[in-house]
Amino acid sequence: MKMLLKVMFCTACLLAGSAYAAVSRDDASALAQKKTNGGRVMSVEKFVEGDKNVWRVKVLTSSGEVRAVFVDEATGKVY
């Protein structure tokens, strides 16, 4: 019984850790909107840049400019 509880606890910890680490598509979209002062999100794509997974969010700004905002999937850093 103790072994089963240990396995269940370890599994729960692993699942919680992996779910917490990644920035979702919706999170990336919201971060990009904030970065562009409420721009309209046109598309969101995930790709690899160097050794990082990043979200590329295309945003239409209020001035009519299309901007690409990049969000690091692991950290949420916006650039």
Image (cartoon, helix red, strand yellow):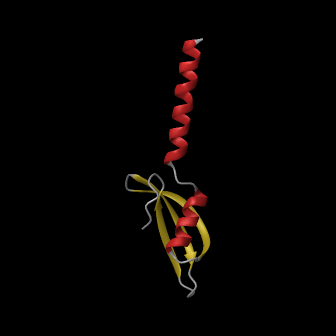
Above or below, 50 against 14 in this view is below
Q: Residue at x 43, y 61 (%)?
A: 77
Q: Quadrant of the C terminus?
A: bottom left
Farthest bottom residue? 63
Q: Is residue 45 left or right of residue 74?
A: right
Instruction: Count every numbered label the image shows and give the total.
Output: 0
Q: Nearer the viewer, residue 68 or 62?
A: 62
What residue do we see at 48% from left, 70% from top? 69
Q: Is residue 58 above or below residue 22?
A: below
Residue 48 coordinates in the image, percent (x, y): 45, 55
Picture quadrant of residue 33: bottom right
Question: Which quadrant is the N terminus positioned in?
Answer: top right
Q: Quadrant of residue 44?
A: bottom right
Pick whichever, 3 or 24, lies toward us: 3
Q: Residue furthest top?
A: 1
Answer above or below: position of 32 versus 2: below
